[in-house]
Image (cartoon, coloured by chain):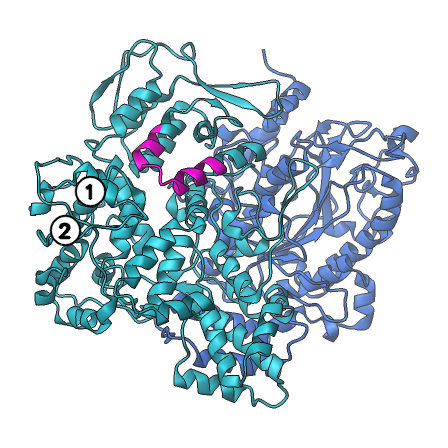
Amino acid sequence: MRRPLILCAIVAAASAASAARGAAQVPAPAKAPPRTPASAPGAASAKSPATKRAAPPAQRAAARPGSKAPRAAPTVPVTIDGLVLARLKELGIQPAPIIGDATFLRRASLDAIGTLPTAAEVRAFLADTDSLKRARLVDRLLAREEFADYWAMKWSDLLRVKSEYPINLWPNAVQAYHHWIRASLRANMPFDEFARTLLTASGSNFREPPANFWRAVQSRKPDALASAAALTFMGVRAEKWPPERLAAMSAFFTHVGYKPTQEWKEEIVYFDPDKAPTLAGATAPDGRVVTIAPDQDPRAAFAEWLVTPQNPWFTRAISNRVWSWLLGRGVVDEPDDLRPDNPPSNPALLAYLEREMVTAHYDVKRLFRLIMTSDTYQRASAGGTALDPRATANFAYYLERPIEAEVLIDAIDQVTGTTEEYSSQIPEPFTMVPEDRRTITLADGSITSPFLKTFGRSPRDLGIEGERDNKPTPAERLALLNSSQIQGKLDRSTVLQALLRASPDAPQLVTNLYLAILSRLPTDAEQKAALAYALTPGINARTAALDLAWALMNTPEFLYRH
Amino acid sequence: MPMNRREAIKHGVVGAGALLSQHWMARSLLASPAPEATAKAVIQIWMWGGPSHLDTFDPKPDAGYDYCGAFTKPIATNADGMVINELLPLLAKQADKYSLIRGMTHGINAHETASYTVQTGRKSNGHDVYPSAGAVVSLFKGYDAGYKGLVPPYVVLTKPQGRFAEAGFLGPKYAPFATGGDPAQARFVVDGVIAQNVTDDRQRARRDLLRQLGALNRAPGADSTLDAFTRSETQAYDLILGDAGKVFDLSGEADDLRARYGRNTFGASCLVARRLVERGVPYITINYEGWDTHKQNFQVMRQKLPQLDQGLATLLQDLKDHGLLDSTIVWCGGEFGRRPRIDWDAPWNGGRNHHGAVFSTLVAGGGFRGAHVVGASDARGEEVRDRPVSPSDLIASVYQLLGINPEAKLPHPQGLDVRAIPGAAEGMSAGGVLQEIL
């Protein structure tokens, strides 16, 4: 039994749920035996044996996606779940039970790849008798092309990938930059390398895509560049700092030069030694004076200071971000607002995540896997009932939240077999996005639609996580309940027509619609309600089927991750 | 050495007009904000594309054929000394209700940046995406201020104006609700509110079905995680199936009134706007396209001006008849004017290019006095001659009448200090608030 014993002892309910899950139990990722301490000074102290663990390189390699995790001897039971449950026990909060397979498949698919599972995937997963099927599913999802699509979308929010005002990257540069971001995520580039590459990039906006990091800002003054670097990689809002700290950090960015070329809208980002007085050093936000070598680009000196396990912000910011993306709330909330007066809800948990990140050499997919295979990730949501805010802050439940605009329209298109038309008005002639492209693959934040605007897609102006607005509005409800766009998709859906024809009887049709839309089987009560609806006077079989699809697409169960 | 105005505008210094008219600035600084709001609502007629000021509200009959083309006989109005284009006879009889601002200026000749500046009162090369006036009014007069209507507080008839007329950093909650559809059709199909092929019976039946399905608990209650969702849905259904949606149904309006407005999209939109004002909607934009007359300006004007004349003149009279004019601001103009010198050659064939140095805007109601002409352009309508007014001056005047403090802080996601109206340091004011007609 790989489950930490302490867990079973503490929370009978959770254990019972796990036992009920039986074969679906998920193993923890490979753990290395204890060895010489590899300290992670950025981490808050946690008095657990795990502080003294670091995986040797061979084990780390084994933990990469696609490879089989070797069985390690059951040793020190410090895990996400142990740390979360310990905190919940302190607070006297009962955690939610573990979810069933269908909910897990839907949740994991939406969270990891921003994509609704198909009915076939649901059937296959429910029929799968492999005891490790949840972990294997996570591995498969992390290897999917949609993983790169979806996370390129998220990173493009944070990096403000957008052609037009107020970012003004220009379409060619947007395509190059987005392509680089996607390829980096697809290859699972270690996050420290990703950060270092962006922070030190120079060259043409068309030919050296990461150089766009320095162009995707609303102002090119040194303090604005410093704020962008701080927000993106330190997870802090520099505008909340004492002004002298930001002023000091800005010195690192006084030599970022920009110049045009003969090519239209091409721009070179470069180290311009003459732009400002030469610096021998500059003061980093932790008060340390960082030496800048003669002829060294000060950005490189900044990156050397920031991108290291010793830095108190770097590892914490990315670990907390990944956690917030999957659990719906950071251990520090909001995830890009780290500051002393905004403490983590569970310091030991955050410290653990940071250690895991360092140990795995900033392998982000490994952290995804670690979190998604934990019990904590697999707990039920509150299902709409009221919650104790402490339970929310300490992950007693999975937090249900509306799915993003892009993911939602893709899910609707998948269910109905329809597509979107996107086009860019610059440069002329207009650029048409091929119709079979999914919305999560859109590179350019300037290419949009009324649907995406209504549903709060990130405008990509500021790069803060909260810029994406997922709060439900009446305008959203009107659009889904009653717009010509959605009704049109249903009315002309060849996929639903085919489903109607292929289903031998009404109950089978109801089941098929449930699998395609809600990714689960209907309950008996739901079957009855759906069949009763088909008997409504004046409503024929086709209309009844379309209305059932309409109704399912309008349930919060469809519109939320839960 | 100070720049002259032309240079200043070339350099994009929008408020540079102030350099020529320091006395206006001094006047605006002395002016105190209105103690009480006179206006409750705004109808903005957005003449997308930039209407020719020479061919509408600032005729120059003596400028010669290369400037005024066929329009050489402007007509007198019922306001002393105010003349307007000869194709606006109905508006000529309503001039006691409106004033003309003939010294509007921002110096921008590109549609999008000019639209942005006119809609927001801000420069487009700033560090932020500012909200349009409609979104700001929606913030201060909408749901947060106790507005209870089911129709969203900021409505656009009928097509969205695009990204420069939106909520900016305020977020989608304050963005306009674009109706879609066409109010001139037998049934005005307002997107989301009225579905063409779904009967009310089917709406009710499938709503009942919807409520029986799904695993998440939707019991209402302030602490439920789905509370905002449930409330939004209730509100949406009140609009779809309740009486609130009837505001878009023009069938109850008298036939002759509908004819007076004009049985076209613009005229019917004006009538819908009046109905929305009656129901307390604080900001309505009529997105009136078709004024970008690079080619064949005069043919287009002959076709459009009678429609504008009919719709706007009837709107002013109808608001008056309903006792709404004193509390409703009507603001009519585009993102810029058009170049006074006509492009006679092919391919323009009598077209006019963009012109941001000076243009005209009509304001009426809600506390704006009528029968005044504010400021003037020069002899050919190329530059401001007197009393420059920037978009931020106009918006500040509108806010003052609505009782919105120009110093009011806007909620910014990064906590930046942004005020409803740009401060002096931003250099957006040209001649200050329109005290002379408030």
x%, y% of residue B240? 58, 73
Give the residue type that dot 2 points to.
Ala
x%, y% of residue A235? 30, 39
Specify whether A406 is left or right of B201. Answer: left
Chain part drawn in magenta: A179-196
Closest to the observer: A84 or B321? A84
Mark 2 secondary-structure assignment: loop
The residue lying at 20 percent from left, 23 percent from top is A288
Among the two numbered marks 1 and 2 on one chain, the one whose residue lies closer to the N terminus: 1
Q: Main secondary structure of the magenta part?
A: helix
Chain B, colour shown: blue
x%, y% of residue A508? 49, 81
Closest to the observer: A554 or A507? A507
Q: Is residue A195 magenta?
A: yes
Q: Quadrant of residue B212?
A: bottom left
Q: Quadrant of residue A62?
A: top left
Mark 1 secondary-structure assignment: helix
Specify whether A53 is left or right of B47. Answer: left
The answer to whether residue A105 is above or below residue B214 is: above
Please, which chain is the residue tagged with disc 1 on? A
Q: Are marks 1 and 2 in contact (CB under 8 Å)?
A: yes
Q: What number is the disc on residue A59?
A: 1
Query: Which residue position holds label 2?
Result: A72
x%, y% of residue A103? 35, 68
Same chain under badges 1 and 2? The reply is: yes
Q: Quadrant of residue A33?
A: top left
| Quadrant of the rendering where the N terminus of chain B is positioned | top right
Q: Which chain is cyan?
A: A
The residue lying at 64 percent from left, 80 percent from top is B199
Give the residue type that dot 1 points to.
Gln
Specify whether A49 is left or right of B71. Answer: left
